[in-house]
Structure formats: structure tokens, C-alpha cells
Image (cartoon, rainbow, N blue to C red):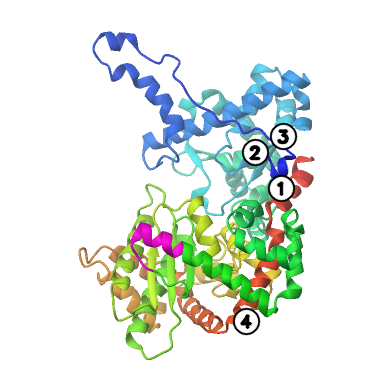
Amino acid sequence: MVGYKGKRVNTLRLWTAAALDPIRLDRFNAGDHVGALVEEARADALVRVLYPADSTAAGQELRLRQEFFFTSASIQDIVRRHAQYNGDVRTLPDKAAIQLNDTHPAVAVAEIMRLLLDEHGLEFNEAWDVTKRTVGYTNHTLLPEALESWPLPLFERLLPRHMQIVYAINSRVLREARKAGLDDGAISAISLIDEGGERRVRMANLAFSGAHSVNGVAALHTELMKSTVFSDLHKLYPDRINNKTNGVTPRRWLQQCNPGLVSVLKDAIGDGFLDDAEKLVELNALADDKLLGERIAEVKRSNKVALAAHIKAITGVRLDPDALFDVHIKRIHEYKRQLLNLIETVALYDEIRSHPERDWVPRVKIFGGKAASSYHNAKLIIKLANDIARRVNSDPAVGGLLKVVFVPNYNVTLAERLIPAADLSEQISTAGMEASGTGNMKFALNGALTIGTLDGANIEIKDRVGDDNIVIFGLTAEEVLAKRAQGYNPREVIEGSRELQQAVSAIATGVFSPDDPNRYAGLMGGIYDSDWFMVAADFDSYAAAQRAVDRRWEDPAGWRAAAIRNIANVGWFSSDRTIAEYAREIWGV
């Protein structure tokens, strides 16, 4: 892979799988021509199915096989090349750094130990020292259900030697915990084996135990790691957790996707920011420059015209490029709260119809994202977005004041069209649940204002761009925890908010799904009954923040100045800075 300006070349290794015996001649000769190829099909499934659903036993097995296959291939290659060129595997930490990206490759800890013990003859203590000094672990989620664990019988059947090694590691870790004076509750939480109910192998605990560095990806996320999902492991290894706030590459997310903006910025401050994104701070001195603001606004409108043409081609929906483009694109998940946005969209739709005499700001609501294959509620949210869009876009009562679009097949290529055209960036996760986010950085870099909660990297973006150049609403992470502890009653909140109650009722009773009136009854019932993601709790604050956005939009000069200050102050969120921190503070490069 040729790096920026061709100064570096890195190697990307891709793995494929093939059957040891591609055709079973005994089955072929017996006339079972499909059965003769079954081993080739099993091997092909390892590299052909991305993120298989793990809601079934077969899906779980395929996913664990995949994770082991890719991880083992990579680890074996690293160790082989090290031994070939350096001889002694004991020097592996001096020459190689292996960073685990969440728990998917966490089996690497046991695989490195297997290679060192079984193939290179190291003693356990020495192998454990080499492994820990080589491995770093980056955590990307605070959701306990997203921290991978595998049924112990499945893990042991597929990886019997690794299971033995996991037990040996666990024995060592638990003895350390007991020696450190931790109580039975803490020791149970630290164990690599979950003994509550079905016994499972905890991959996050394996990764944490087998790494010399464990990092979060935003300041709040890292602090919450210490007090929530890894609180007991943090007590045992208090110096292990550190923060490395995420970054995005300005080559793709500014230079490649928004050449018009880059041209304007070069005219304004020179081209130093192309090599060092933090030099964008020089724009601060020009934030109130009328001509610069107008030139950037012209580029934004041009990007909106191009996006509108693309959306018209793929969905048939016509968009007004002079409307406010309000964009919510990310993985579909209840904690990311596309549902909050959709309910507020319904409330806005009702308000426009009820009060057509008001001076409404024309708004285009654009949604995009994919749902995990077995995540039922996420699939329902996608369907709801499309049902709302169908109703709103065909209603002459709202005219061109509100349009709703769910763009199909969301991917990076589509994001490169959407982000440069966005005026408003939706970053509205339930506080305390988003590790970092990177879309928030990409939008701000391209001159969109953020509406968001104090969650993930939103907090650090707010600190960088200033309180006046971001729209913050909703409960804080501490307030979310306190509300849950106090016995939060969402039904009371819904019944106390006329707009919220009306919107939820309309969705629940089939106003947007006349072909199936009960389609969203359960989805809305979940908000009434528990509202774990605080949709009702944050609704009024969110709706008020959206009307504050309308007022800001009506001051074009003020909006442009805020957009420039966003571009100017998010250069720090470059992946160059992030990777330099990993290199200096974790890998020792």
C-alpha cells in the first residue's frame, strides 16, 4: 500500500481459504456431485460471508472459525518472518507490535502463546512475558453484550489446545487477583471464564489480561472503561488503561471527498494543512471574513446539488439544495438513536401541518446505515424511516418544507458524497454509550455543525470548536446512570409532552404503516415500558435544540462563521496524530 506522497510502502496481507481435499472422490464416484464439494464450500464460507449472524449455533461457529482463521494466519506469518530474520522469538516485542482491534482478534493472545510454547519451546512464564509485551488491545465499546464471549463447549471443541492455554492464563490471572486482595465478586468479574449460567469464554478479559496496553478511543470512553466494564481488571492492573482519541484521515475525508473546499482553503491559508491538518487553525483568524464564508457556502451548495442529483437517481426523491441538509448516517442501533430523530421528524411534520402560517426552515432529513442481520429492532427502525419518508414526501400540506430520505446501501463511497453536502451532523447517542464516533469528526472537518449529546468524542469536539459552534442537548452520562438508578418512568415523561405523545401514538397506531397498523406497536411499547436508551427522556431537549438550529440557519453569516470555526479546529482529530500517539506511547516506534 503506497502511502501519502509515496514516501512509505506498507504491506497488506489478504488471506483466502482452500480445502485440503477440494473434491471428495468417494462421494463424486457415488454420484453425490454436490456432496463431493462440501469441504471446498466450508473453506469458502470462511472468507466469503462477512459478519455472519451469531444468533444461531451455526452462525456462532462460523464466526469463531473466521476469527481464528484470520488471526492465526496473521500471527503465524508475523512470527515466521520474525524468526526468519531475527532468529530468537524472545525478541518479538522489540520488532513487532500486534494491536487487537476490539475483541474480534482476541484469540491472538492464546495463539501467540501456542506458537511460543508448542513450536518454539518457551516456558510458560517466558512465553507470557513475550506475549504481553507484544500485544496491545483497543476497546471500542462499553456495551457489555458487545464484548464477545463464546460458549465454552464450542470454543473447546473447535480450539482444544487454545482452551487449555486460556485455562492456564486464567489460573495465573486469578492467583494475581487473590494475591492483590480482591474479593470474590471482583475475582468472578476478572475471570476469563464466565460462570454465571452457561459457561462462556470472555474474549475482552483475555485481551485485557494478555496486553501491556489497553486503550479507549475518546477521553470519556476511557474513563468509563475504568469504572464500568473493566473496573475490576483496572483495580488489578491500574497502569494498563490509557486513552488514544480516534482520528480520521484528512486525505480521504477532506482532500479526496471535497476538492472544492480544499481549493478554497488553499487560497485562504496556503497548502500547509495538506501535510499537517492541525494547521487548519489558521482559519480562525478568517472565521468572520464575508468573502471566505460566501466561497465556502458556494462549495457546500455545489456539493448539495450533486448529492440531490444522486439521490434523485437512486430514490426518485427531489431535494431542494437550498434547504438545510440534516444528515444522520451510521450503523443502525438503538443506542445511536435514529429512533429519537425519527420521532422528532414526526413531531415536526405534525407541527408544520398544524401551523402552516409559521416561517418554517425547509429541511431535508437524510438517514443511512446498515443493521446487523439478526437485530430485529434495528431492521424495524430502517422500515420506519422508509414508511415516514413515504408519507411525508407525498403530503402536499408540507410542500417543500420537509423531506425525508433513507439512502439505500450505505457505504464509504456514499459517505464521501453525503458528508461534504451536510449542513447538520447528527451525533445523538445516549450519553455514556458511544465509545468515540468518527463520523462526527468527518462532518465537522467538512463544515457541518454538530447537534449532539455529551458523549464519545463529541465532548472533545466541543472543547476544540467552542460552545458557540456546536449544539449540545440531553442528559449527561452521569445523569443517565442516576435516572436509571432512581427508577425512571418513561410513561410519565411521554404523557407530559404533547408533541412526544402525539408522535409516538401516531407511529404506534399505524399512521405511517396503514398496511400493517401494529408494525411499530412493540417498538413504541419499548419506549413506554423501559426506554433504556432515554429516547423519551431526551426528546424535549432534542426538539428544542433542533428549533435552535432553525434560528441559527436563518442567520447565514453566523452559520458560515461557525462552519469555518469547525473546519479550523478539528484538524487535531487527524489519524496522523492518533497513530503517532500509538507509535510513541504503545508500540515504542
Given residues 451 and 292, the one toward you in this image is 292
Where disc 1 sits, the SS reads helix
Please report the bounds of the magenta region as a residue range: 307-318
Check disc 2 and report its element: helix, strand or loop. helix
Q: Position of residue 121 (x, y in %)?
A: 70, 17
Residue visible at 28% across and 76% down in the picture: 395
Which residue is label 1 attached to?
A: 579
310 w.r.t. 55: above or below = below
Q: Amino acid at mark 2?
A: Leu
Q: Work out which residue is located at the far left of the displayed protein and give it.
A: 515
Q: In the rendered structure, find residue 174 and report the number of the disc placed on it.
A: 2
Label number found at residue 558? 4
SS assignment at label 4: helix
Residue 295, how many percent across, how many down?
Answer: 62, 72
Q: CA distance from mark 1 to mark 4?
A: 35 Å
First in residue order: circle 4 vs circle 3: 3
Picture quarter containing residue 165?
top right
> Mark 2 Cα within 10 Å, few/some/many (few <14, many 20+)?
some
Q: Quadrant of the N terminus?
A: top right
Contact? badges 4 and 3 (CB < 8 Å): no
Marks 4 and 2 sit apart, C-alpha to C-alpha, by 58 Å
4 or 2: tag closer to the N-terminus: 2
Q: Upstream in the sequence, badge 2 or badge 3?
A: 3
Question: For residue 223, which quarter of the picture?
Answer: bottom right
Amino acid type of the residue that numbered disc 1 sits on in the rendered structure: Ile
Disc 1 or disc 2, which is closer to the eye?
1
Tell me what residue is drawn at x 64 percent, y 75 percent.
Answer: 293
Q: Which residue is mark 3?
A: 134
